[in-house]
Amino acid sequence: MTTGLIFDVKRYAIHDGPGIRTTVFFKGCPLACRWCHNPESQQAAPELVFRRNRCIACRACLDACVRGAISWSEGGPETDVSKCARCGCCAAVCWAEARQIAGRETTVEEVIAEVERDAAFYERSGGGVTFSGGEPLAQIEFLDALLRASRSRGIHTALDTCGLAPWDAIERIRHNVDLFLYDLKIMDDSKHREMTGESNERILENLRSLSRLGHEIRVRIPIIPGVNDNDDSLRAIGAFVSSLNSIPGIDILPYNRMGADKYARLNRPYGLPDIRDLSDERMAGIALMLGLFGLRVKIGG
Ligand code: SF4
Ligand code: SF4
């Protein structure tokens, strides 16, 4: 039985490809983007999430933790992550749902059963299933099995990827992907390393190869203030994408700070604490500039 680690399944998604979709979020990513708005997607292991604002100070978690990872302070429960085994015992007794475990091991059959629940909506809206993350290509056995199972049921498939994977992995699954949603962040390699922890060389090469092979691809660019929203960076992206084939359009995704709170819940520092939101006017200006490269640009996913 093929299994994989996911952290969420979102039904009725309308920003992850055409029509109404179910999006399956894989856990684990080879990049560590400083602005990541889904930090719970990054580690390839379950994690404890604590929402302090939901805590009603009942102390049930204190008794539930046999590892002594939880202590009590004036502000309520504190967790020593070095002692936490992510067993979920504290989450099980926390009826206020202040404590939860992000990430669960699941089977292909379980995921497909959930995806199939909305088959009628996919048919009517031209939707389907989107595999997102995290990075689905990092769990290639699981992804391959899910794509095959979706295809055999006639469900449209989209893969939302950061593109950092061996070509062998992409080669293995590409014929079962109807649409690639391909994230592109920064063209300058040293800046890419600084902001994501990895080089962009393989990411660009994989995108070139998919494009050469004629796959349908929507390039998605998160616009991050102070990182890639300057004119030089945008022109470099525009020139690169416009040189490719089979790119019907690009989506520019405005940065928002909604993910910042999630870092506190995971007991992690936020990588870009002083970042500001982007105005609608600036996003419209960026769309215009990229449009000058002959690209069809959409704001939002
Ligand atoms: S069990 Fe939940 S609500 Fe109760 S003290 Fe612990 S975190 Fe707070
Ligand atoms: S997940 Fe388990 S080990 Fe970690 S704090 Fe909760 S009960 Fe303790």
Image (cartoon, grey):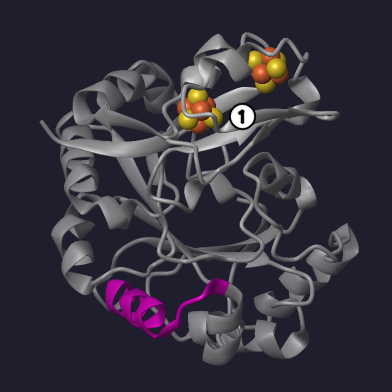
Q: Inspect the magenta stretch and tell me whether residue 197 lies in it.
A: yes
Q: What element carries label 1?
A: strand
Of 265 and 11, nearer the camera is 265
For residue 120, say whether it is visible. yes
Query: Residue 120 appears in which quarter of the rendering?
Result: top left
Q: In the rendered structure, which segment of residues is drawn in magenta?
A: 196-211
In the image, is residue 25 above or below residue 176?
above
Disc 1 under 8 Å from ligand 2? The reply is yes
Residue lying at 59% horizontally and 34% vertically, measured from the top left = 49
Residue found 67% across the figure and 29% down from its top: 71
- Residue 150 is left or right of residue 182, and the answer is left
Whether residue 152 sits left or right of residue 235 in the image: it is left
In percent of width and height, residue 75 lies at 83, 30
Q: Where is residue 25 in the image (x, y as percent from the top left)?
A: 43, 40
Image quadrant for the N terminus?
top left
Task: Please state if 186 lies on the left or on the right of 6 as rendered.
Answer: right
Amino acid carrying mark 1 in the image:
Ile
**Extreme residue in the left direction:** 1
Which one is nearer the viewer's eye here, 102 or 300?
102
x, y percent for residue 280: 86, 58
Residue 33 x, y percent position in the rendering: 57, 66
Q: What secondary structure is the stretch in magenta mostly built from?
A: helix
Establish if 242 lies above or below 101.
below
Residue 36 placement: quadrant: bottom right
Verify whether residue 208 appears in magenta: yes
| Residue at the spot of label 1 | 70
Up-down: is 230 above or below 53?
below
Residue 296's place in the image compared with 243, above or below, is above
Q: Report the residue at 59% width, 82% height from top.
A: 194
Q: Which residue is drawn at 69% across and 64% down?
A: 271
